[in-house]
């Protein structure tokens, strides 16, 4: 009997403008340890033996990509100039662009370009723990702080119980066809798991760690630099 092994593709949405960073260029191209920030996650994904190809979704008018040398990352890396107005649009654009390549049940790992501290063990753990799942899931960390809900004047309205609350990270890993259908139907989602949930499915949480932070504000850039520097040392 022939056994079918799904392949693993990475899609890295990198068509954002980085408005909260407020820098002179989109944050994915800001320097981080001598490389563009996005280089770090791309290098980790390209080096993962389980991942067949790494598609990076850039904005249609991206002028920065061509200014850098990506050759060290090898032939797995494929730029796609099909980013959209939102993160979800960019991911969906990437999924549509790889339609000829991906089979329905192949896995797609969506990872933010803005999470440069992705490590090989994050990828290995995610793929290992989700291998037997039908739907897929995502890296996440349990909420550690006490949570407050505020009114418009920042007065506390309530303390929200943190039991069972997790912070979503990326990669988020789902079957190609399931994710594409979910994103084609979903409206205004901030991650892939939300689209899958709206389709009535239940993604599984795989525990990651706080080092896989998203660079959103200037301070995050310093934290990411510290994490990467100390990991190498
Ligand atoms: N239209 C968009 C918006 C975001 N992204 C990507 O989605 C990831 C997570 O988004 P976020 O951190 O919000 O990035 P930005 O949208 O660039 O930042 P901001 O919201 O501060 O403008 C980033 O890798 C970003 O490049 C994308 O591909 N296409
Ligand atoms: C996908 C994500 O990184 C999970 O935490 C996050 O939702 C992206 O949100 P953003 O508002 O686009 O930064």
Image (cartoon, rainbow, N blue to C red):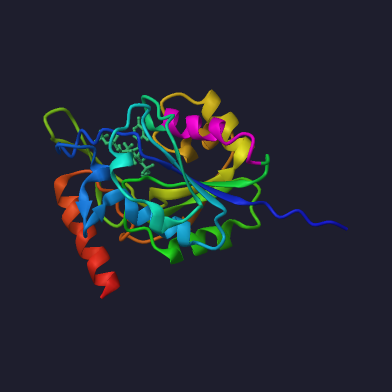
User: Viewer-proximal residue, 53 or 104?
Assistant: 53
47 versus 146 height, above or below: below
Residue at left 14%, top 36%?
A: 24
Judge whether 97 appears above or below 47 on screen: above
Q: Position of residue 125 (x, y in %)?
A: 50, 63
Q: Can residue 173 be spotted in the picture?
A: yes
Q: Quadrant of the C terminus?
A: bottom left
Q: Quadrant of residue 50?
A: bottom right
Who's the residue at 25% across and 55% down the image? 35
Of all residues, the one furthest to the left in this rendering is 153
Q: Position of residue 133 (x, y in %)?
A: 64, 52
In percent of width and height, residue 215 lies at 25, 48
Would you say the magenta stretch is mainly helix, strand or loop?
helix
Classify residue 1 as left or right of residue 4. Answer: right
Residue under the point 49% across and 40% down: 193
Viewed as shown, does residue 98 lie left or right of 191?
right
Q: Quadrant of the N terminus?
A: bottom right
Residue farthest to the right, as pictured: 1
**In screen coordinates, is 6 left or right of 65?**
right
Return the x and y of residue 77 as percentages of the image width and height. Answer: 47, 49
Q: Specify whether residue 8 is painted magenta.
A: no
Residue drawn 24% across the image and 36% down it: 18
- Is 16 or 61 nearer to us in this picture? 61
Nearer-the-camera pick, 17 or 173: 17
Can residue 115 be seen here? The reply is no
Question: Ligand 1 sits in which quadrant?
Answer: top left
- The image shows a total of numbered marks equal to 0
The magenta stretch spans residue 91? yes
Per the rendered image, the range of residues in magenta is 88-102
């Amino acid at each position: 009997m022939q056994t079918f092994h799904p392949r693993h593709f990475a899609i890295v949405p990198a068509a954002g403008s980085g408005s909260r960073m407020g820098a002179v260029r989109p944050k994915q191209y800001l320097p981080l340890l001598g490389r563009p920030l996005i280089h770090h996650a791309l290098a980790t994904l390209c080096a993962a033996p389980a991942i067949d190809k790494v598609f990076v979704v850039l904005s249609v008018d991206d002028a920065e990509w061509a200014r850098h040398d990506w050759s060290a990352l090898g032939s797995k890396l494929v730029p796609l100039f099909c980013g959209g107005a939102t993160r979800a649009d960019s991911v969906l654009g990437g999924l549509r662009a790889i339609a000829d390549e991906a089979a329905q049940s192949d896995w797609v790992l969506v990872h933010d370009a803005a999470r440069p501290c992705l490590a090989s063990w994050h990828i290995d753990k995610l793929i290992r723990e989700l291998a037997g799942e039908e739907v897929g899931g995502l890296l996440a960390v349990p909420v550690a702080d006490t949570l407050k809900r505020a009114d418009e004047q920042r007065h506390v309205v309530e303390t929200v119980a943190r039991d069972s609350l997790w912070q979503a990270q990326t990669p988020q890993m789902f079957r190609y066809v399931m994710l594409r259908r979910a994103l084609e139907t979903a409206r205004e989602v901030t991650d892939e798991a939300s689209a899958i949930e709206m389709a009535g499915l239940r993604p599984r949480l795989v525990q990651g760690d706080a080092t896989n932070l998203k660079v959103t504000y200037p301070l995050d850039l310093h934290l990411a630099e510290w994490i990467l520097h100390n990991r190498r040392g």
